[in-house]
Image (spheres, helix red, strand yellow):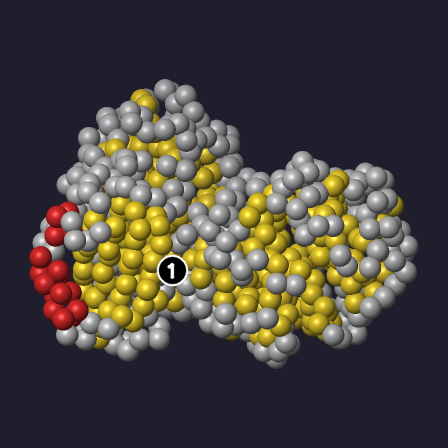
Amino acid sequence: MKTYLQLIIALLLSSLSTQAQWQQTNGPYGGNIYSLAVIGSNTFAGTYGSGVFLSTDNGANWTAVNTELTNKIVRALAINGTNLFAGTGGGGVFLSTNYGTNWTALNTGLTNNSIQSLAVIDTNIFAGTWGGGVFRSSDNGANWTAVNSGLTSNQIYSLAGIGSDIYAGTYAGGVFYSSDNGDNWNAVNTGLTGLYVYSLAISGTNVFAGTYNRGVFLSTNNGTNWSPVNTGLTNLNITGIAVNNQNIFVATYSGAFLSTNNGINWNPVNNGLTTPSTRAFAVNNPYLFAGTSGGVFLSTNNGDSWTDVNHNLLATKINCFVENSSYLFAGTWGGGVFSSSDNGINWDRMNDGFTNANIYTLVINGSDIFAGTLGAGVFRSTNNGTNWFAVNSGISSTHVNSIVINGTNIFACTQGSGVYHSTNYGTSWTAVNSGLTNLYVNSLVFVNPNIFAGTNGGMFISTDQGTSWSQINNGLTNTYIRCIAVKEEKLFVGTTGSIFLSTDNGTNWNPVNTGIPSREIKTIIVEGDNLFLGISDYGVYVSANDGSSWTQVSTGLGDYYVNSLFVKDSNLYAGTEVSGVWRRPLSQIVTGVTENPNTIPTKFSLEQNYPNPFNPLTIINYQLPIDNWVTLKVYNVLGREVATLVNEAKKLGRYEVRFDASTLSSGMYFYRLTAGNPSTSFGSTQDGGSGQGFTSTKKILLVK
C-alpha cells in the first residue's frame, strides 16, 4: 500500500505538460516480407526497411528485434543451429545468437554488401550478392571468401545445395552449378528458357528453378537438362519455392500454388490470402508461413486456407488516405486498403475483390470509393470498401497514379498513357490527351473550371474537361511534378527537389523553398491557413505563410520517409515508407512549430501514452538529457509490478517503448520512469531538469 500511495502522490505532483510529438498508430499491420525463417518455436520475418520481426506464438504476435541491425532491408534469412543470419541490402551479413535480441555485423572479406540470398549448406555458409557474385564462409560468417571462378554472372538471386553440390540462380545468366563447394562453377542452362532465376529448391534428386515470366523448371540430373513444369500455373513470375516432404509450394505475384507430384501439376492455394503477391515461405510442421507484400499469412492445412497473422508487425508502406464518414482509409503498397473508425487504434483490411494490392490513390464520390492501383487499373467499391470490382474498360495502362472527381466527371491519370475520362462512374473510360506531350502523369487537381496535370515533363492545364491540354512551365526549373495542392487562388506543386507557387492559374511559377531541403516532395496538403509537406527522408514541414518559410515538425516520427498526409478530426496523419501510419494533433503543430528533431534533449521527460485508453498495445515516449540508468515499470492499482519495460543503461536522447498488455485484465494501471537517483531534487517535477535523477508516474487505462 505504501508503494501505491507513493505512485498516487507522484502522479498528483506531475502537473507540467509534456513535449508534443508524433505517435505511431496501431497499424496498419503487415509490410513487405522478403524472407522467413524458423528456429524451434521462433518464427522470423525479414522486411523491406523495418528489419527483422520475431514471433514466438506462430505469428499471433510480433516484436521487432533490430538492436545493432544497422541496415533494415532484410532480403535473406538463414539458420545454422541456433544461429540466425540476416542478409541485408547494403549492410552485408549480420548474425544473432540469441534469437534476434542482438546482432553483429560479419563482413570481413565481404567486398559487396548487397546481399540477395543466403544458404547454409553442410558446414559452409554462402552469400549471394548483387554485383559481387558468391561468397563462402567456413567459420560461421567470421570470414568470407569470394568463390566466383567460372561464374560469368555476378548478380545472384538465389542459392541452394546439398553436400558439395551448389546451385546459384542469377540475373540474366540462368543457373550455375558447382560440385566442389563453390570453388568452380559451370553454367547449366540446357532447356532453361528463363534466365532470370529468382528462386531455387531441392527435393531429393530434383532441382527446381523459379524464373521471371517463364515459370518453374525441373532438373533431375544436377542441372544438365531442364524441363518446364507449369501445368496449372496461372502466373509464371516465381518469387519463391519451398519443399515440405512431397509438397512443393511456389510463390508468385498472384498467390501461392501447390504441387504434390514434383511439379507435373499445380493448384492455386489462396483461400484467405488477401494480399496475393507472395515472396517467401517457411515450414514448421504443421505450420506453413507465407511472406507477402502485405505481411505474413499462416496455414495449418497445407495451404487450403490462410489466416492473416500480422499483429504488431508494423512495416507497412502507406501511399494515400481518404475519409468517408467516420472511417479513415489508408491505401498501402502490397497490403491493399485498410480502414479505421477509431483514429488508428484499430485497422481492418478491406481487400475483397482486389487482384492487385498496390494502392496508389483513393478518392470518395458519395457512397463510392475508387482506388487506383499499380498494375491492375481502377477499382470501385459501392459499400464502403467491403467489396471491390475492377472498372477498367477503355484504360490501356494499369498503372494509375491519381483519380479526381468533379460532379459526374471522373479523371484518372496513368504512367505512360496519359489521362482518362469517365462520365459513368468508371464503367467506361476515354483517353483525353490532345496536347498532353508527356503521358507520364503523376497528379491531377480540379480548380473549376480548369484541370491541372503534373507530369514527368512539367505542368499542363485543360480548360475544357480534358478535351485539350496546354503546357504551363514558365518559371519551373524542375519539371518532374510529384504532387499538386490548391489553396484559394494559389496553386502549389512539389517536384523532386523544390516547391513552386503560382498565383495566376499556372501562367507563372516561383520557388518557395526557404527552410526545406532539396529532396523529393512526396505530398502537399492544405489545412486552413497552413500548408503541410511530406519530404523524402526529412519528414513533415509546415508553412503558415504560403510557403515563404517552412519549419520541420517531425519530432517523434520514427520514419522520415513520408509519402502521404491527411487531416481528420483535428489530427494530422502521416503515411510513411516502412512503418505505417503516424498521428499528431494539429493544435500541437500550428501553435508551436519551432521544434528541431535533431536537438539534444535539455531535460528529462515522460510523456502520456498513446492511445489511452488502449487495447492491448500502447506507446510510451521519454527523453533523457544525459546518459543514465533507466527503469520503466508498470504497476496495477495495488502497487504491484506487472511489467518491466526498460531496465538498462541508456544514452541521452528520445526513446519510444511499446507496451503490449495482452496478458493483463482491463483496468487502471500506472507506469513509472526512474532515471539515475530519483531522490535528487530534480526528481520531484515531471518535466525534470539536467540533474542526475528523475522520476515520473502516469496512469493508463486498459479497456478490453
379 or 48: which is nearer to us?
48
Residue 363 location in percent, x, y?
A: 36, 53
Q: Amino acid at mark 1?
A: Gly
Q: Residue at the spot x=84%, y=56% of the render?
A: 165
User: Which quarter shows the C terminus?
Assistant: bottom left
600 or 312: which is nearer to us?
600
Q: Where is 432 relative to 629, above or below?
A: above
Residue 631 location in percent, x, y?
A: 29, 57
User: Which quarter shows the N terminus?
Assistant: bottom left
| Residue 249 in sight in this render | yes
Q: Tell how many labels.
A: 1
Q: Secondary structure at mark 1?
A: loop
Q: Residue at the spot x=44%, y=27% of the render?
A: 479
| Residue 486 in sight in this render | no
618 or 670: which is nearer to us?
670
Disc 1 crowd rating (10 Å Cα; few below 14, some 14-19, many 20+) is many
Residue 153 location in percent, x, y?
A: 77, 40
Q: In the picture provided, is 27 more to the left or to the right than 74?
A: left
Residue 380 location in percent, x, y?
A: 43, 60
Q: Residue at the spot x=45%, y=58% of the render?
A: 64
Location of mark 1 (residue)? 27
Q: Residue at the spot x=24%, y=27% of the render?
A: 549
175 or 575: which is nearer to us?
175
